[in-house]
Image: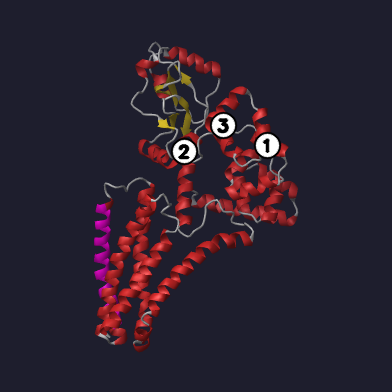
Amino acid sequence: MQTTGDKEKHQKRLHTFTEALAGGTLASVKIMLNGLHPAEIAHVLESLPATERELLWEMVDEKLGGDVLLNVNDEVRASLIRDMEPQELVAAAEGLETDDLADFLTDLPDVVIHEVLQSMDEQDRHRLESVLPYPEDTAGGLMNTDTITVRPDVTLDVVLRYLRLRGHLPEMTDNLFVVNRKDRYLGKLPLTVLLTQPVSLTVSEVMAKDEEPILASMSASDVATLFEHHDLVSASVVDESRKLLGRITIDDVVDIIRDEGEHSLLSMTGLDEEDDMFAPIAVSARHRGVWLGINLLTAFLASGVIGLFEDTIEKVVALAVLMPVVASMGGIAGSQTLTLVIRGIAVGKIGGSNARKLLVRELAVGLLNGLLWAAVVAAITVLWFGDFQIGAIIAFAIVVNLVVAALAGVLIPMVMRKFGADPALGGSVLLTTVTDVVGFMAFLGLAALFL
């Protein structure tokens, strides 16, 4: 997540590049561009329209190309790759970490994938092949194979000499992994222990055995939760037989958390975090048009309910004035519950064991707020229209709609999850339909009955 300072810095940088491109000072633009971190270059590219983006992309140093492509969203990456020559794509793939390369290869043409694999040595190709079978959103898809393993029967002195002989450690290394001769995971040797314990002790005497490794099939979301709860910097990844496959590091988990936050926010409006902000107008219109169409159908459903009470509305004009109040109150209350439940599901805080208690709690909150604001709205209505009967009707309708909104806010995401759908995607549309229909039905139905 970007801080306010980072956002301001990016805005200034974007302004500088835009001005430089407009002024034609391309040499200075290239120097500035390649002095940035790949993630910062990606951010700039995503923030520019297609024409300027293509011009800037041509200036990116070949050595940075692969890392930049990994940092841009899927739609922008696809558009950049589409215009690249095979040899450029092969060059971009060189030097990438195994987990990053696995993600990158899925976007490349078959002929380029073959060339990339042919250019790798046997050990790196074997590591890559161990990652490729796993989906991107699993621990196996996230892991890197740059692990350092040691045997349990050697002394710490031997381990230290081995590390000095290697000359370097992979980034984010805080543990060495202990395996047997068949590469079965046994435990981990923290570097802090290695550096502080007597060198005459064996690895088996000081290694940590209490931390379970992560199964390669575990979802990325569960991996992020595990890192959060245990304050991990890195963790081992194993297959079903506990054979060590690789490790996941905190930098990958930060990406998961950011992506999940963007997904939850954008999905509630039918958008995708991988969409290109400057995609062609027709493409963006088509993507958004689907959800506008769905929303239109639900709006006609609510309008149909209003149409059933057309005669009543004609006789009492105040009903037409007050209808939006009932629907709006229910919509806001339901959205609060819906957002709370979707977040709870996403972080694993809501399940079968506590769903009923949460439902009862939200119904109670809805009832309490309903009674409070029903009294406020009723008082305003009486003062406005001088009609106690309409005040009582709208008060009752608000109480009913807020209780139903709480019920829908809990049940909609729970039911969607049960059927394997993303609760964030379309949940708000369904909720709006429920609160509009129930609100109008309760308010106008009572009005037709008593007025």
User: What residue is shown with label 3?
Assistant: 98
Q: CA distance from mark 1 to mark 2?
A: 25 Å
Give SS at disc 2: loop
Q: Residue 112: which disc? A: 1
Identify which residue is drawn at 36% across, 81% down.
Answer: 309
Q: Which residues are magenta?
A: 356-381
- Considering only vertical position in the picture, is 73 above or below 110? below
* Residue 406 percent location from the top left of the image: 31, 62
Q: Label 1 sits on what residue type?
A: Val
Classify residue 109 by image quadrant: top right
Can you give x and y, in whole percent of width and height, for residue 28 in the image?
Answer: 72, 47
Task: Please tell me how crowded label 2 is: few (under 14), some (14-19), or many (20+) other residues with Cα within 10 Å.
Answer: some
Q: Toward the viewer: 368 or 34? A: 368
Q: Which mark is residue 138?
A: 2
Relative to the observer, which residue lies in front, 72 or 436? 436
Report if residue 380 lies within the magenta region.
yes
Mark 1: give few (<14), some (14-19) or many (20+) Cα within 10 Å: some
User: Residue at (40%, 34%) from the top-left corner?
Assistant: 232
Task: Establish if 142 lies above or below 292.
Answer: above
Q: Secondary structure at mark 1?
A: helix
| Magenta stretch secondary structure, dominant | helix
**Is 232 located above or below residue 376 in the figure?**
above
Q: How many callouts does the rendering have?
A: 3
Q: Earlier in the sequence, mark 1 or mark 2?
A: 1
**How many angstroms separate mark 3 from mark 1 (CA)?**
17 Å
Amino acid at dot 3: Thr
In percent of the image, x 34 and y 85: which residue is there? 312
For the residues labelled 3 and 2, the Cα–Cα distance comes to 15 Å
The mark that comes first in sequence, 3 or 2, is 3
